[in-house]
C-alpha cells in the first residue's frame, strides 16, 4: 500500500493524481516547485519501477514539465530525482526564472522556504485546472 | 549538426556514445559524476525532443543509473537535468555515497572540482567496459 513519506507530506500541498504519480506543490513560494511521487510502495530508484511504470513516470514528468513551462512562463524547467534525504522516489519539476532568488544555481538548500497562503495555493490550483488534462484528478483544497 | 557545448567539453572527459546520447565524465573526482547529452541540435528541454528520442533518452538514463549503481556500489543515484547555465540539454547521472563531501546535499556548487588524472579516467573506462552493453561505443582515451 502506498503511503506518502511524512516529510514530503509536511513540506507540500496536495494537488491531485496522475494515473501513476501524486502531484504535490512544495510549500515554498520562491519558485513554482512541483513534486511527482509514483504511488508505489518501497521504491527509491527509477529503475526499481517495473517497465510499464517507468514509461508512465517519464511520460508524466515530461508532460508536466511542458505544461508548467507554458502555464508559468518559465525561463527553464529543472527536472530532478535526488532522494538523498527522503528515500521515497520523487521527481522534482521546478519552474525557474532568471529573476528567481537562486538563479542560476539549483534550488535545494539555497534560501529558506517561503510558505504559501491558502489563497495563493488556490490560485495555483485554478491555473492548473485550465491546463492539466482529463487524466489528472484534482484533490480538494486542503 | 550536433556540436557539444564548449563548457561541457571543457569540464568533462569523453567516454563514448549510446545510440542517442554522448556519455561524458565530469572532471570532478569527488563523485563518479556522468552526463548524458543527446546528439541533437538546438534542444534545451526534454519535451523538445521528438517522441522517439524522448523514449531513448529516458531509457538510456534509466539503464545507465542502474548500471552505475551496481558498478560503483552507490548509496543513491541522483538524476537531474537543470540547464540553467549550459542550455544544451544534458542529464546528470551521479553516483552518491553517504561518505561523499556533499552528502546529503546536491553536488552542484558545493565543493571545488578535483580533476582526475588520466590514469584515474582510464580505470573508470575499464570498469565501464565490463558493464556497458554492445549498444555503447567507447571513444579512444583522450
Image (cartoon, coloured by chain):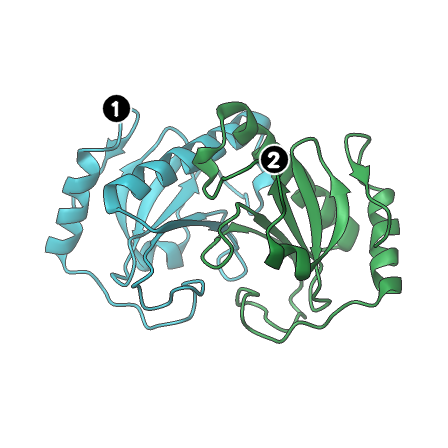
Chain colours: A cyan, B green
Residue A130 is left or right of residue A10, and the answer is left
Chain ID at mark 2: B
The foreground one among B15 and A91 is B15
Left or right, residue A5 beside residue B127: left
Secondary structure type for disc 1 = loop
Return the residue found at the far front: B1
- In percent of width and height, residue B23 lies at 70, 45
Subunit that carries the residue with mark 1: A
Q: Quadrant of the N terminus of chain A?
A: top left
Residue B133 appears at what percent x and percent y? 80, 34
- The residue drawn where x is 42% and y is 52% is A5
Please provide percent x and percent y for residue A83: 52, 55
Q: Residue at 53%, 51% (x, y): give it.
A: B80
How packed mark 2 is, by other alpha carbons closer than 10 Å (few <14, some 14-19, many 20 or more), is: few
Q: Position of residue B3 (x, y in %)?
A: 62, 44
Q: Residue at x 59, y 71 (%)?
A: B102
Q: Is residue B1 shown above or below A25?
A: above
List the residue tagged with mark 2: B1
Q: Using the rendered image, report if marks 2 and 1 lie on a common chain.
A: no
Q: Which residue is mark 1?
A: A134
Amino acid at each position: 500500500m502506498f503511503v506518502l513519506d511524512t516529510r514530503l507530506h509536511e513540506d507540500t500541498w496536495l494537488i491531485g493524481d496522475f494515473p501513476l504519480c501524486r502531484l504535490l506543490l512544495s510549500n515554498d513560494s520562491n519558485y513554482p516547485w512541483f513534486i511527482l511521487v509514483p504511488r508505489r510502495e518501497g521504491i527509491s530508484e527509477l529503475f526499481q519501477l517495473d517497465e510499464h511504470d517507468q514509461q508512465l513516470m517519464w511520460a508524466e514528468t515530461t508532460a508536466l514539465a511542458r505544461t508548467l513551462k507554458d502555464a508559468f512562463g518559465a525561463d527553464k524547467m529543472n527536472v530532478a530525482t535526488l532522494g538523498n534525504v527522503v528515500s521515497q522516489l520523487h521527481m522534482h519539476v521546478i519552474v525557474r526564472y532568471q529573476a528567481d532568488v537562486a538563479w542560476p544555481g539549483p534550488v535545494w538548500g539555497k534560501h529558506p522556504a517561503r510558505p504559501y497562503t491558502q489563497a495563493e495555493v488556490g490560485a495555483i490550483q485554478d491555473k492548473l485546472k485550465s491546463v492539466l488534462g482529463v487524466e489528472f484528478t484534482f484533490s480538494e483544497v486542503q
